[in-house]
Amino acid sequence: MKKMGAQPTAAILDPKGEVGHLYGAKTTPNMFIIDPSGKLIYAGAIDDHPTPAISDIQSSKNYVSAALSEAMNGKAVQTPVTRPYGCSVKYWQ
């Protein structure tokens, strides 16, 4: 993460795929938001444009940002599940 310049607040190393299987992760990325009580409040895609094109970012609906904003403002997440897109997760078990 340091080499890539990433600064996450937490990271999970899951070499056996236990957490991935627990949440049903099928693609990478596959986003999950868990509230402070441990409840899964969002699962799915980052946004509504299944493309890596930087030009699509401005016109995309960011599901993760919207869900976090709603949850942090005490509101229910309006779109709690979307279809994730990306490369398939390879579980080696």
Image (cartoon, rainbow, N blue to C red):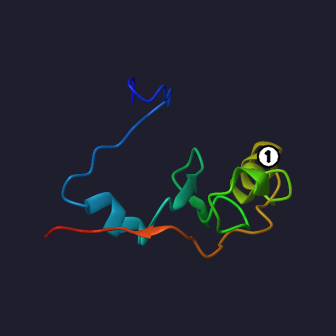
Residue sitting at x 32%, y 69%: 21
Foreground pick, 47 / 65: 47
Residue sitting at x 39%, y 23%: 2
Measuring from the top left, give residue 66's x and y in whole percent. Answer: 79, 53
Where does the C terminus fall, quadrant-wise?
Answer: bottom left
Foreground pick, 13 / 37: 13
21 above or below 34?
below
Foreground pick, 65 / 27: 27
Residue sitting at x 72%, y 67%: 49
- Is 91 displayed left or right of 86 in the figure? left
Label 1 sits on a secondary structure element that is helix
Measuring from the top left, give residue 61's x and y in whole percent. Answer: 81, 60
Quadrant of res 77: bottom right
- Is 6 displayed left or right of 72 in the figure? left
- Is 49 displayed left or right of 44 in the figure? right
Measuring from the top left, give residue 85's x and y in whole percent. Answer: 56, 70
7 above or below 85?
above
Quadrant of res 1: top left
Residue under numbered circle 1: 69
- Is 22 displayed left or right of 77 in the figure? left
Residue sitting at x 64%, y 58%: 46
View extreme (bottom): residue: 83
